Image (cartoon, rainbow, N blue to C red):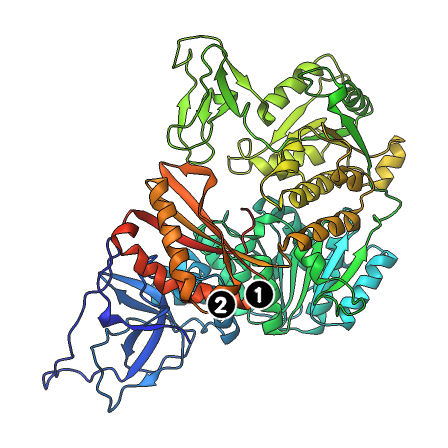
Amino acid sequence: MPRRTPISTIAPAPDAGAPTTAGPAAPPPESAPAQPAWRLDIAVQTPAHAALGDLLSYAGAVPLVPGTLVRVPLGRREVLGVVWNTPTSLDGAEPDMALKPVGAALDALTPLGEAWRDLVAFAARYYQRSIGEIALAALPPQLRDLTTTQLARRLKRKTTTGPVAQTAEAANLIALSPEQTAALAHIEAESGTFLLVGSTGSGKTEVYLRCVADLLARDPEAQALVMVPEINLTPQLEARFKARFGDEAVVSLHSGMTNPQRLASWLAAHSGAARIVLGTRMAVFASIPGLKLIVVDEEHDPSYKQQEGARYSARDLAVWRGQREGAKVILGSATPSLESWHQSRPAEGDDPGGRYVRLEMPSRIGAGELPAVRLVDMNLQPPKTVLSGALLDAIGQRIARGEQSMIFLNRRGYAPVLACGDCGWKSECPHCSAYRVFHKIDRTLRCHHCGFTERVPRACPACGNPDIAPVGRGTERLEEHLAELFAAVKRPDGSAVRIARIDADSTKKQGALESQLAAVHAGEVDVLVGTQMIAKGHDFRRITLVAAVNPDGALFSSDFRAPERLFSLLMQSAGRAGRDATYLAAQGATAEMWIQTFHSQHPLFMALRKHDYATFAKQQLDERQAAAMPPFAFQALLRADAREQSVAQAFLNMAADAAEALPGADIVTRYPAVPLSIQRVANVERAQMLIESPSRAALQRLLASWQPLLHELRRTPEGKGVIRWLVDVDPHSI
């Protein structure tokens, strides 16, 4: 049962503009209008840590339908809220306190459905946030500011639904492989959640397209939700869906859109006019009343886990939403998350198996083969070697034949550190416990955590030595180095080699990413350098060689998920090579993945050489089971931020002590508070405490009971110095 707070009982929170306390209702004068006769429970976005409860109670003159959007007073402001429950009559009742009246109702908009409200309520309960925070964050920002008249004007636009017209591409479909045909047959015949394990280039997207086409042809009211992990993957997928189903049937939802664009897409999905919704993690909360199919592409990607505010997993919510609404769910990946792989295990002996149906497509479309993986032992290379001679020779051969190569380095900027060789000064950020990255292109030192930026000093600030030098390498420096190495090499037409870089710095301007990707697809780029932005999802047809320059850091990370992420990233990178078998045959070339490493005998690389995800997954799952780690245990993090590390840790340790008497505490382990790996960001000290249990239910019970205690601790003298605290359920990085 959601917590309800009468709006009149709330005391103002600091800086929150919370409503003032009102006394008992005075009898109205004879000339006053009739008092509102209905009590309405409204979900509003209340101030963080205000402990106002999930729902606020207001009075209304009419019994508004649950899911109706309304304007309500909150302190000195008027905010948007959602009617959450069936109204209760106030006739004949003597309320303890006066309830503030509801403002205008946006009744031109169809109320948000029960299934959507159930999704929001579940997400709030599971991830330990308020209903109002989740609900209002899920709505387009512009909707919060529109008047009833403005909204009615928007809704006058055509919003009809019906059969989706077949486009020219849909009328000329390519033949399916036997593996694709088998996967489609399983999805058609069964219900529930499917894990589609398809190697890179196996045609997973075509399976998605066919599933959506079958659904829309079978049910004229049905809608589909297709999710991708990152914004930069949306345009190419959107182009494929629009080519197949037409522009009117498809809308996108992601944070890179303008507010009017997001509102238009949301309204089209809510009304049913948009039959297909494409989006990033935020799209999992879209109001889609006819939802019958959910596709989560690259389901393993960490980007599906929100890292600010309510830290939800869009993939996990997609599975829950599919179960709640009776929609089929397809999780697709060449390297599934170990949680999904474990949930799709077949029944064996006493093990009943997982909840998902595993469908495998190990072969590439056509005669294409997965790239051969070559390991370069950097222990045998001269000191300070950046790119081995054999790798440079292989890239040069491909340039001479007019083929493309891709160099992957997951570190942007020119160099991670600028240092003085005389006194040992390094480019530390004054506000964070991290180094500022040297960006040569604009001669700045930039902190990638707080954003603090300064011009590069002419000499060492500590000792005056003018010879300060970059240490390490980022994509910007690697791009410069490659340009120097291949300056004398010519393309087949005699022109100079063209090297391009795609990372967060080179794609800041509007349209920059699209234009750079178009140049790669057109064959205008010989060597592409980039971060993980280029490592997944892109269908580059002319790339025959991919190289990973420095992947070893993740092998020995303190985060137990690091090897899983590294294997996925390298296997996804390898999948960019040799995707067009016809092109390879015409060139007489073979696709290759080169990995430069100091640990060439590591089991991860041994499995990668064989493209053997199953062996890697088994080894990782065996280790996790022995250590009682997810998916064999369930975790949460309690985080605290303060001006002093001691204050943050003291708050967490007090919280651990307070949890001793809570239900389920005996089977929930609370580890000592520790600083984060980067413990200071923007002059705020950060600490965390890991909570772990073999029982998900026990962990959830403890977290729910803990919330009021945490609010109380924050108000104690010891907790006053805490800037904020948060709970992260199922954390992706520790």
Q: Residue 5 carries which label?
A: none
Left or right, residue 720 beside residue 635: left
160, 204: nearer the viewer? 204
**Residue for point 36% across, 48% down:** 650
Left or right, residue 406 beside residue 135: right
The first of marks 1 and 2 along the sequence is 2
Amino acid under disc 1: Ser
Residue 254 at what x, y percent from top left?
53, 52
Q: Are marks 1 and 2 in contact (CB under 8 Å)?
A: yes
147, 72: nearer the viewer? 72
Image quadrant holding the N terminus, namely bottom left
Kindly indicate the quadrant of the structure image that contains residue 507. Answer: top right
Q: What is the crowding at mark 2: few (fewer than 14 residues within 10 Å), some, or many (at least 20)?
A: some
Q: Is residue 524 above or below residue 270?
A: above
Amino acid under disc 2: Gly
> At numbered mark 1, what does the secondary structure look like: helix, strand or loop?
loop
Mark nearer the viewer, 1 or 2: 2
Q: How far apart are marks 1 and 2 (CA)?
A: 9 Å
Residue 619 at what x, y percent from top left?
75, 49
Q: Residue 695 carries which label?
A: 1
Residue 673 at what x, y percent from top left?
44, 47
Name the residue carrying label 2. 664
Residue 121 at what x, y percent from top left?
47, 69
**Residue for point 62% across, 68% down:** 322
